[in-house]
Amino acid sequence: MAYGKPVIASAVGANYAAVLHGESGFLAKTLDEWHSAFEIMITNRALSLSMGQASLNHFVLHYELQHVQNKIARLLQ
C-alpha cells in the first residue's frame, strides 16, 4: 500500500478495512478468487496501476505515521 502497489490479501479481519476490494486491490477467500485476482493484476496493467494509486491514497489517509500518531493522541486525551 505505502509503495503504491495494488493489494491481494486474504478476506479476513483487518484486511476488510485495509483493502478496498475492487478499488485498491482484491480480497480473496477461495483458490479461484486468488487465481482470478493475480490473473487480473498480471493482464490488466491499467487497472493494476490505478489500484496501486488508490492503495497509496488509502494508506496515506488512514495508515501514514502522522495520521496514526494523531489518532492515538486523541484517544489518550
Image (spheres, rainbow, N blue to C red):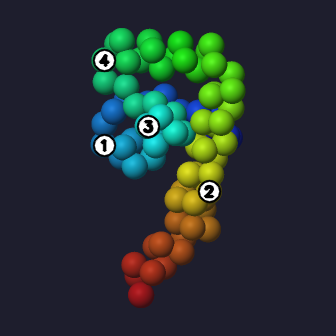
Amino acid found under the numbered disc labelled 4: Thr
The quarter in which the C terminus is drawn is bottom left
For the residues labelled 1 and 3, say whether their Cβ atoms are less than 8 Å apart. Answer: no
For the residues labelled 4 and 1, say whether their Cβ atoms are less than 8 Å apart. Answer: no
C-alpha span from label 1 to label 2: 20 Å
* Residue drawn at 47 percent across, 34 percent down: 22
Mark 3 falls on what kind of element?
loop
The label on residue 45 is none
Q: Which residue lies under the disc numbered 1? A: 13
Q: Which residue lies under the disc numbered 3? A: 21
Q: Which residue lies under the disc numbered 2? A: 60
Mark 4 falls on what kind of element?
loop
Q: Earlier in the sequence, mark 4 or mark 3?
A: 3
Q: Is residue 51 left or right of residue 26?
A: right
Q: Earlier in the sequence, mark 1 or mark 2?
A: 1
> Vertically, is 35 above or below 18?
above
Q: Residues within 10 Å of mark 1 (few under 14, many from 20)?
A: few
Q: Which residue lies under the disc numbered 4? A: 30
C-alpha span from label 2 to label 4: 29 Å
Mark 1 falls on what kind of element?
loop
